[in-house]
Each structure stands twice: as C-alpha cells, then as structure tokens.
Image (tube, rainbow, N blue to C red):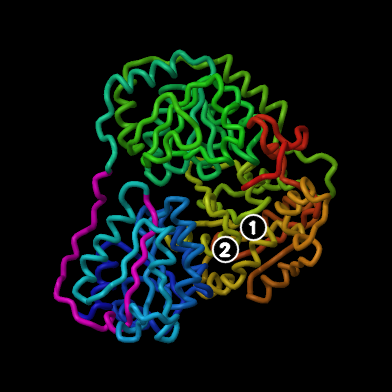
Amino acid sequence: MKVSDYIAEFLESQRITCVFELAGGMITHLLDSLHRKGKIKIVSMHHEQGAAFAADAFGRITGLPGIALATSGPGATNLLTGIASCYFDSSPAIFITGQVNTHEQKGNKDIRQLGFQETDIVKMALPITKKTFSVKTSEDVPRIFEEAFQVAISGRPGPVLIDLPMNLQRGEVNIFNFDKIKKHANNTIDNIAKKDLDQIIEKLIQAKRPLILAGRGIRSGFVLDEFIKFVEKINIPVVSSLLAVDVLPFNHPLRVGFIGSYGNRWANIALGTCDCLLVLGSRLDIRQTGADVDSFSKDKTIIHIDIEKTEINNRVKTKIGINTDLNVFLKQINNAIARIQFPLKKEWLNTITELRSAWPDIKELNNIEGINPNVFVHKLSEKANRVKYFIADVGNHQMWAAQSLELSKEQLFITSGGMGAMGFGLPAAIGAAIASNNSSTVVIAGDGGFQVNIQELQTIVSNKLPIKIIVLNNNCLGMIRQFQDSYFDSRYQSTYWGYGSPDFEKVGKAYGIDSKTISGENEFDEALKWFFDDDDETKLLQVMIDVHTNAYPKLAFGKPIAEMEPFSKPLDIEGT
C-alpha cells in the first residue's frame, strides 16, 4: 500500500473525521490520498496558523487528536504558534509536515539549506511538543503514527509532530494494523492510599472557608460528571481558572466565579481568604495566584491534585500533593465519601454571596462612554440558549467574556490560555463547529485579534459554517493600551497611535456575511434577535466600545490576589 494511502486509512480507523490544512507541494500525496479515500473531510484553511488553531479546538472537544497538515518551510513554521497553544493548554493534536525528498536534505553538511524550502521543523518544534518524529524510511510510518496517537492522548494531552519527506509519502508499506489506539497507562499513582484520602476529607470537613479551584484538567480529562458529583456531595464552593469557567453552570449554587489577573473581584477575595484550597487540574501559574506567592499560601492548607508531577510544588508549596489522573482521584474520593454527610458551610457561602453583591461585574466599569461590555456579555448570554460553544480570542474581550458569560451545563468556553495567542478565535470556532457537526458556535473577538486571522472568514463561507461572530471593536489593542496607562503615562504607541481597524460590518459583507453594527445599549435586544434568528446562517455583529474602556478588576501586580485595580495600585511592572 502507498504510504499516503496508509495514513489516510489509519486516520479513518482512529475515528478522525476531518483534517485542517493549507495546500503545499510537499503534502500533495497526503491530500490526494485523503481525497480519493473520501471519508475524511478536508478543511482547506487560509493560513497554517488557522489550521493549527482549528485542530486545537477539535482536540479539546473530541478528546481525539486534531490533525493539521502543512508543507515544508514556511508552511511548517506557520504551524508553530498553534502547536504551542496545544502544548500549553493540553490539547491532543498531530501535526504532519511535508518535508523535501530525503536526497535533497542537507544532512550533516555545514550549509544552511540544500532542498528548496528545506527546514528543520523537528528541532524547532521540540520544546513545544510531547514528541517529534522525523521519518527516515517508509517502513517506519505505521509504528510512528501509532506511537504519535498514543503520546498525544495519554497522560496530560498535547501535540506531536511528524515530519514526512515527500518521497517517503509515495513509498510502500506492508503493515496494515488498524486497531484503535488506546491511551498508555499513566506514570502516576493509580491507587491513592486510604490515609491520603482520609486526610484530604478531614481537611475539607474541618475547614471553615474551604474552596475548590477547578482547572483545565477537568475538561481535558473528560471527568466533568465525576467532578460535579464530587462537588455536590461535599458541598464546597468552586472557583475556576480561565480555561475552566464552564465546569459549573452559571446558576449553580456552588459556583463562585472566575479567578486570576482579571478574575471576578468577589472570587479573588474568596480565593485570598479561604483556609483550605483543593486544586484540581490547575497549575497555579502567576496569573492565578499573583506574584506574591507567600501571601497566597499564608494561613491556608493547599491540596494539589495534578497529572503532571512537576506542576506540584512548583511555584506554590502545598500541604498535600498527589500526582494522579483526575479520573482516578475523583472516582476514589467519591467512593470514600459516599456514606458521609457534608453540611453546607452556610456562613462561608453567605460571605461569598455578600461579596458578589458588593462587587458586581457590571459595576466595575464606572463612568464609561457608550456600551458596557460586561452588560453586553450578560445580555448575549440571555439570548444564546441554543449556543453550544463560546470561543474567545485574546485580549480585553476575552476577560469580559470570562467574567460575565452565563454558561449552562451544556455550553463550553474555549480560549487560548497559556499561549495567549491573538488570532485564536476565528479558526478555533471552525474547528469546534466541524468537530461537532455544525453545532451552534459563537466567536467573541476584539478588533486586534480578529484581524490576525481574518482571512478565515472565507473558510467559514466556503464550508457554509453557521458561526456567529461578535467583534467588540474599541479601535485599539485595549489590553496593552490599559498596560500603557498603568506604566507608560498613557503613551499609546502601536496600540492606539499608529494602529487601525476597518469597519468590520463592511468586511463581513465583502465576504458575503450578513453583518450589522451597534453603538448603544438600547440596540441590544433588536440586534441580538437578528443575530440569533437563524441558527443555520453565519452572521457578524460589530459592537462599538469606547477606546478607553478597561478590563476591571485587574490584579495589582506584586500585591495579594484580593487586591485589584483600580482601587489598589501595582507595586511593580508585570513580568507576564
């Protein structure tokens, strides 16, 4: 069998329904085989970065590796930002790059390049992948693809890269093993000691102000049902990281809110004042804890459960750290607490309720001109009951969305967390819609991030995807402009001065997308009725936001997590 035919059949055998790509000479054999076999949808993107972000979202939703293909040289290097996004946010993915023929490769010669577009993408991708493969012979292809799938989905999920020379794609292979790839056993604790479970349960029972911090590991481990079972049994309130704002429905009585640098003020105060913190699948990075780690840890028992051993006791020292899969932990602790009655911590819950009432998200922005974005996001949520996925790009709009979206149990929130890559939103929405057979998907983007991969509007149109697009247009790079207010005496070089954005209503119409613009809160109802009127139609709504509208609250850098701008001022300039 021809190698490229084998790859097409192998992908099909692993339940892969689509691949994302931008055509190039070094992947034409693969594209032709996928086309001739005809069972896998080929989604032709308009930039390789878009293909990578689409694969990222596909992997997050399905738990199967998202597949992105690119040619050698610029095609391969254009994938790198998306590969890193998968790596930092634990998204399973396989990136297949075409490479020049083996006889055109420079090998050990002391030259920069031999073949046209020859580029050592394997070495470039090594720090941002779980594993890379440089295929040397056609006979190696079955083993490499099987291993790549296992690596991508096992343990903490992530990306793998396979670099495949063009002449090997047209080679022959005689192995036809199409068994479904299973996850490797994790190199973690798979049987938690009873004394450790008992100690955790005792700490949570004894605490007066216990809190659970939910992280991305809950979604990436597909353990949401076990997590909710645990939370509702143990009756402890839950705060979430940016990548886990969707783990509990907005109206759940134990949901507190979003924490971190731009977290809900009441949630950050709860995080700062709790006396026992159970961390599930979150790495406690600086945007979650603030720079003042001593203050964050003071007077609280921290229990950290994580699949990656090196994340435990990394920045924040814990009292109890267990390196295990969340599926293992949640099943075992749910069994351990099955016959225990856990009373509500009524005083603690009342305190959180009072904090939420005292610091509502829609009142953080006072005396602004025009539309309050937090008010708009709440209104959007009210009308979006049929939406399955909310995809946020990166910037102030991302934080307004995380602060204020009212998500139901069936709705997912997807964004670029660790990489924080502008341009993520539009192509990720394509991956989400295709992964879910065109489930209703809403993109929330800012004018800056939207322009990074604006070309993918054509991919949406070409594939007739019913994606709804919100562009919160403040005519600047708002998050960095706010940074310049704090540290550079409001000198807005390259964020407002020298920056520009088009009229996105006109841009949408140029692509054949029905588009509108609003600039006042009195227009919300009519615009959102139009926006959601037809589930099967792509629409774009431009929402005009004043250029000086900030994302508040914001952690005052160098101070404890509960001390936030604009009422508290940072001690030092952010390093992240």
Query: In the picture, residue 318 is in which quadrant?
Result: top left
Query: In the picture, residue 375 is in which quadrant?
Result: top right
Query: In the picture, residue 331 is in which quadrant?
Result: top left
Residue type beneath disc 2: Leu
Magenta-drawn stretch contains 453 = no
Going by the image, does 240 lie left or right of 339?
Answer: right
The residue located at (81%, 39%) in the rendering is: 366
Residue type beneath disc 1: Ala
CB-based contact (under 8 Å), mark 1 and mark 2: yes
Q: Which residues are magenta?
A: 157-186
The residue located at (75%, 49%) in the rendering is: 482
Q: Position of residue 475 (x, y in %)?
A: 77, 61
Say which mark, if any, is on residue 426: 2
SS assignment at label 2: helix
In what quadrant of the picture does the N terminus appear?
bottom left
Going by the image, does 403 lie left or right of 35?
Answer: right
How many labels were placed on the picture? 2
Say which mark, if any, is on residue 445: 1
The residue located at (30%, 86%) in the rendering is: 103
Whether residue 519 appears in this view of the structure is yes
Choose the circle earlier in sequence order: 1 or 2.
Answer: 2
User: What distance separates the C-alpha of mark 1 from that of mark 2?
Assistant: 8 Å
SS assignment at label 1: strand
